[in-house]
Amino acid sequence: MDRNVILKAYFNSRALVEEQIRSYNLFLDTIQNIIDENKYIDPKVSDFTIKLGKIEVGTPHTIEADGLKKPILPWEARLRGRSYLAPIHLEMTPLHRGIEGNTEKLYVGQIPVLVKSKLCHLENLTPEELISVGEDPADPGGYFITNGTERFIGNREETATSKLLVKEILNGFKGSYQTHTGSFKAKVNITREKSGALRVGFPNVVKAKLINVLMALGMDSHDKIRVAFKNSDEVQNDLLINFEESEVTNEEEALKYLGHFVAPNQPIEYKLRRSQEVLDQFLLPNLGTDPDARMAKAKALIRMAEKVIDCSYGLRPIDDLDNYANKRIITTGPMMEQLFRQAFKRFINDIRKNAERTVTRRRKLRLKTLVQPEMLTQSIIVAINTGVWNPQTKGVTRALTRTNFVSPLIDFKRINSSLSTMRASMEARQLHGTHWGKVCCIQTPDDENVGLTKNLSTLGIITIDESEEYVKDVLEKNKLLKI
C-alpha cells in the first residue's frame, strides 16, 4: 500500500490545527456557563442588584474613522496593525427591591477570534474563495491577531485531573485527586502512614482522620463504614486500626472535630455550621455542593482509600506520573476559558465599584454608565500579548514564526510542560514508553528545557473534551441505565 496515498487522505480529512480550532469552538459553546456562574452582581448598595442573562458573541468587524462599521478579514488586520476581535453583548436586568426592571442588551467588550474558527469569516471557505478574498489557501489558521501580530496559544502538558494518583512518600503512601468546578480547584489527599493510619486533606482541612470525615459526611457508625469498604483482609485490618484511633461516635462529634480545623477558638454552633459548609463547598465539589451529595463524597473517599491501601500492600502498582495516561494536553479552548473567566470577574468587580461610586455621588444608577467595555477587552488582549495568564502561569502565548512554511506547523505541534525547569527530575525529562506514536522521540531543545518541551507526532491527535450534556445524550441513546 502506498503510504503517500494514506497521508494525503489523512491531511485532506482533517486540519493540521484541528485540536486548537475545535477546542476554541467548544469554549464559545460553553461561554454561557461562565456567565451563569456569576448570575447576580450585588453592589454594596441597598436594594439594588444586577441580573445577568444571555451572552452573544458576534463576528469580527472594525469601525473606521468616519464611524462606518464593516467586517474585517485577517489580512487587513495584519496590514493595518489591527486586532481581529468579535464584539460581545450581554443581557442585563436591574433589580430594585427584588422587582425586575427593563432588560437591556449592552455591549460589554470584545474577544480575540481564532483564525478559521466558527466566528472567523474564513470558516469553510474553499481554496478558490480564500484566494479571492486575499488569503493564503495553505494557511492552517489556529492563531490570534492582536495589533497586527500573529500569536498562538501553545499546548501545555499537565497532570491529569479527576484521577487518583498514588505515590510512595517518606512515611507511607499518598494518593492525590485534583478536580475543578468553574474557577475553583480543589485537591484531595489520602495518606496512609506506615502505622496504617489513614488521613485525608482538602482545602481548609489538613490531615484529618479519615474515619472522622466519613462520619461527618453521614456514615454515623463504624458498622456502616465497615460495610462500605471492600471485604479484603488488608483493608479490614487497616480499618480496625483506624477505628481504634477514632475518638468520635456520631455525626455531631465528627463535625465538632472538623471545626477545630476550619473554625478554631469559635463557638460550637459556628464550628458545626462552618464544618458543614466546608464539606459541601470544598470537598469534591465536582460531585455536588449541597448536603444531598455528602454520601456520594463519602463513597468516593472510600474508593480512594482502598486504592491507597492496596498500593501500600503491593496489591496494586503505584502510579507512574510520567505515563502519558496520567497526563493531559491543554489546548487553546481551556486556556481561553480560564482567561475569560478571570477577565470577566475583574469586569464584574469594576461594575460593582462603579455602582457604589455612583450612589456615593448621589447620581442615578444606569446600567449603561456602569459598564466599561474596555475593562474586559484590555484584560484579555494584554494577557494574549504578554502570555501571562496569572503570576503562576506564564509563557502561554508566543509570536507565530513565518520563517518558512514548516515553522508555524512545528509551533502548533510543540508541547510545553508545566514543570519548572529548576525542579524537574531526570525521570520527567527522559523518554517514556507511552510516548511512542504520540510524541516525537527526537525533537526537543538542548538547553534546560530538554525533555520538558516535546513535539506532538505528525499524525498525533489530541482529543477534545465534550460537554456533559452531549455525553449524557450519547449514553441515553445507547440505552445505558443510570446506577
Image (cartoon, rainbow, N blue to C red):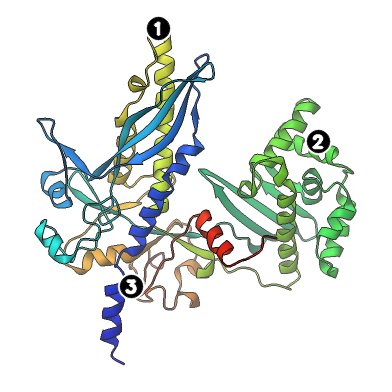
| Mark 3 residue crowding within 10 angstroms, few (<14) / some (14–19) / many (20+) | some
Picture layout, residue 248 above or below residue 406: above
- Look at discs 2 and 3 and give the one toward the viewer: 2
Question: Residue 420 bears which disc, if any?
Answer: none
Is residue 448 visible in the rendered structure shown here? no
Against 393, residue 17 (above or below) is: below
Q: Give the residue drawn at x 77%, y 32%.
A: 272
Quadrant in which the C terminus appears = bottom right
Q: Which residue is mark 1?
A: 362
**Disc 2 or 3, which lies upstream in sequence?**
2
Q: Kindly indicate whether the residue at mark 1 contacts the one at mark 3 (C-beta within 8 angstroms).
A: no
Q: Nearer the viewer, mark 3 or mark 1?
A: 1
- In this view of the protein, which residue sits in the foreground, 426 or 110? 110
According to the picture, the residue beneath numbered tag 2 turns out to be: 256
Graded by Cα atoms within 10 Å as few (under 14), some (14 to 19) or many (20 or more), the crowding at tag 2 reads: many
The three-letter code of the residue at mark 1 reads Arg
Mark-to-mark CA distance, 3 and 1: 64 Å
Whether pointer 2 and pointer 3 mark residues with C-beta atoms closer than 8 Å, the reply is no
Nearest the viewer among 443 and 396 is 396
Task: Kindly identify which residue carries mark 3.
Answer: 443
Q: Nearer the viewer, mark 1 or mark 2?
A: 1
| Of 45 and 469, the residue lying toward us | 469
Q: Amino acid at mark 3?
A: Gln
Q: Determine the residue located farthest toward the bottom in the rendered image.
A: 1
Label 2 to label 3: alpha-carbon separation = 56 Å
Q: Residue at x 43, y 41 (%)?
A: 341
| Secondary structure at numbered mark 3 | loop
Q: Residues within 10 Å of mark 1 (few under 14, many from 20)?
A: few
Q: Earlier in the sequence, mark 3 or mark 1?
A: 1
